[in-house]
Structure formats: C-alpha cells, structure tokens
Image (tube, helix red, strand yellow):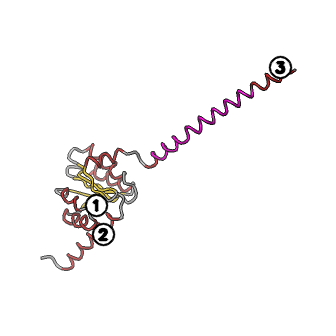
Amino acid sequence: MPSNSILAQKQQIVADLAEQIKNSAAGVIVNYQGITVDADTAMRKALRTAGVKYVVMKNTLTGRACDEVGYSALKEYLNGMTAIAISENDPVVAAKILKEYASKVESFNILAGYVDGEVIDAAKVNDLAEIPSKEVLIAKFLGSIRSPLYSFAYAIQAVVDKNGEAAPAAEAAEA
C-alpha cells in the first residue's frame, strides 16, 4: 500500500491537472505511440510556442482529473500511451498542431477532446483543426466589411470624375 506522502503527491498532481483543464479553452487527448524522439521534440516545441501544455501522465490520474472537472466521458479514451494537450486561450491551436503530426505519423492518433465544456470525439477534433486561426478569421471579416465600402467609394469617385469632366465641357459651351 502506498504511503500517505505518495498519495498526497498523486492527489496534488490530479488537482493541478484538473485546474489546468478547468481553466483551459480546449484540450485534445492523443495516443502518442510510435512517434519518434525527433518528431516528439518538434511537436512539443510547436505546442509550447503556441501556448499549449502537453502532459504525459498515467491514465488513471488523467481520468481522475477529468472526473473532477466533469469530463468523465474522456475516460473511455484513456487506454494505452496517451497524452493530453491543454490550450488555455485558443480552442483551435492544439487540434491544428496535433492533426499535423497525426498526418505525419501513422500510429499517432487523435482520440478525443473537449471544447466549450463539451467532450468531443476525434472527428470533431479534426473538424476543429480545420477552422482557420483567429487572426485569419478577423482578416476575412474585415475584408468583407471593407469590400463594400471600397466599392461605394469607387462609385462616388466615378460620379465625381464624370461630373468633373462635364463641368469643363459646360464652361466651354457657355463661352
């Protein structure tokens, strides 16, 4: 039987992970079996750069943390070599990066995830990864707003130019 200090240590680990999950925008659970050290290092660096925490932990501890925050449905995916990527701010970035590596490494699989307080399956995580980044969406929105304004401005300028050409012709006719 484990000592009280070890139990307290594990309880603290579960509490810390539960707090990270609770305060996050989204998370993705992956089976990382078969990824090479180089690919794993590059993936972890990409995740870290994007502000995503990538945690490899015993499935039982991850399952307990999921229970604490109300994501008990994720426990069914915690089999084998699993890890969880937790994104504090951007609900899309973890899915994007992990999908990129899942397409490169055949045995590396996205299992499930969560976003907006809801547990989602691998298909929905992949759909989430297809969403353009926040910056791209903002740029597209601003472009769609700007386009009609520019068209209107060009139309007004065309009227001004047309009237400007008609005015000298009218002045010449009066003389």
Tag in front: 1 or 2: 2
Q: Residue at x 48, y 42 (%)?
A: 140
Sequence-first disc among 1 and 3 = 1
- Residue that label 2 marks: 16
Look at the image and tell me whether residue 42 can be seen: no
Q: Secondary structure at mark 1?
A: strand
Q: Is residue 156 part of the magenta span, yes or no? A: yes
Sequence-first disc among 1 and 2 = 2
Residue 67, percent across and down?
A: 23, 66
Gap between marks 1 and 3 measured at Cα? 83 Å
Q: Residue furthest left?
A: 1
Vertical arrangement, residue 163 with respect to residue 128, above or below:
above
Residue 83, percent across and down?
A: 25, 57
Vertical arrangement, residue 85 with respect to residue 154, above or below:
below
Sequence-first disc among 3 and 2 = 2
Q: Amino acid at mark 3?
A: Ala
Q: Is residue 20 part of the magenta span, yes or no? A: no
Residue 132, percent across and down?
A: 40, 45
Q: Secondary structure at mark 2?
A: helix
Q: Amino acid at mark 1?
A: Val
Quick one: quadrant of the N terminus?
A: bottom left
Q: Secondary structure at mark 3?
A: helix
Residue 27's image quarter? bottom left
Vertical arrangement, residue 80 with respect to residue 162, above or below:
below
- Residue that label 3 marks: 173
Q: Amino acid at mark 2?
A: Asp
In magenta, the rendered stretch is 136-164
What label sits on residue 55 in the rendered view? 1
Residue 9's image quarter? bottom left
